[in-house]
Amino acid sequence: MRVLIVEDDSRLGAQTARFLESRGLEVSVVDRGLTGREVAHREHFDCILLDLNLPDADGVDICRSIRDRSDVPIIIVTGRDADADVVLGLEVGADDYIVKPFSARVLLARIRATVRRVHPAANPAASPAGSPLRAGKLELDPSTMSVTLDGTEVAFTAHEFAILAKLVEKAGAVVSREELSERGTDAAALRTVDLHLSHIRKKLGDTERPPRLIKTIRGRGYALVKTA
């Protein structure tokens, strides 16, 4: 597994790299946002750890630029802990958001979980035989992480795909926010689920009020209609 760390704190970058390498990961570290963007566009990585407070560029802009050209998992690792920063990071395409200081073991677990969502073969239990999932005109292929709606392919991030897959698997039934969350069950994690659902609806064109494909069941969770 190849990981790119974009972090201007050289000591933290080196410490994180050493820990990840001791666990078998291949790590590259850069201390500038523009350099990180260039390297991310040029080389293949399984995950990118991106700081927001970079000396030469706003990490949000770097995240947006990388996401525009790639579906590589991006985990923002930053000292910014305001709700507005978390929301913005997720809205521009980050798959996860970790606030400094952080546990190296938790970081590794987050990396592995995110990469498993992008490469389902690494987690056979998640989708036996990689069978396509269908609900009406909506079809998901876990083996390729592709989504089509009425024959048209729609691009989703790893987290969005994982959430949508759970809804399709249980089409017609209510799925709780806790079940859809893979980051925990605290308020911030559940808010992340809501944000991802908002993005999913927009990509599916499910922007009517109330939505016609993914229903919000107040106090219980979400439900995908069987005829989506």
Image: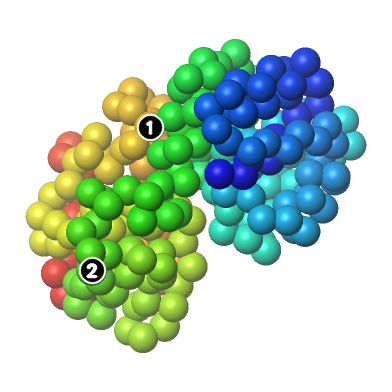
* Number of other residues with Cα within 10 Å of mark 2, as a class: few under 14, some 14 to 19, many 20 or more: few
8 vs 15: above or below = below
Q: Position of residue 110 (x, y in %)?
A: 46, 32
Amino acid type shown at disc 2: Ser
Point out which mark residue 183 bears.
Answer: 1
193 vs 204: above or below = above
Q: Residue at x 37, y 50 (%)?
A: 122
Residue in the foreground of this view, choosing between 198 and 21: 21
Q: How was the colour assigned to the protein in this rendering?
A: rainbow
Amino acid type shown at disc 1: Arg
In the image, 12: left or right of 195?
Answer: right
Q: Quadrant of residue 201?
A: bottom left
In the image, 147: left or right of 47?
Answer: left
Q: Residue at x 77, y 59 (%)?
A: 42
Distance between mark 2 and mark 1 Cα atoms: 25 Å
Point out which mark residue 131 bears.
Answer: 2
In the image, 35: left or right of 109?
Answer: right
User: Which quadrant: the N terminus?
Assistant: top right
Q: Position of residue 76 (x, y in %)?
A: 61, 35
User: Which quadrant: the C terminus?
Assistant: bottom left
- The secondary element bearing badge 1 is classed as loop
**Of marks 2 and 1, the one in the foreground:** 2
Q: Quadrant of residue 212?
A: bottom left
The mark that comes first in sequence, 2 or 1, is 2
In the image, 77: left or right of 138?
Answer: right
Q: Position of residue 120 (x, y in %)?
A: 36, 55
Point out which mark residue 139 bears.
Answer: none
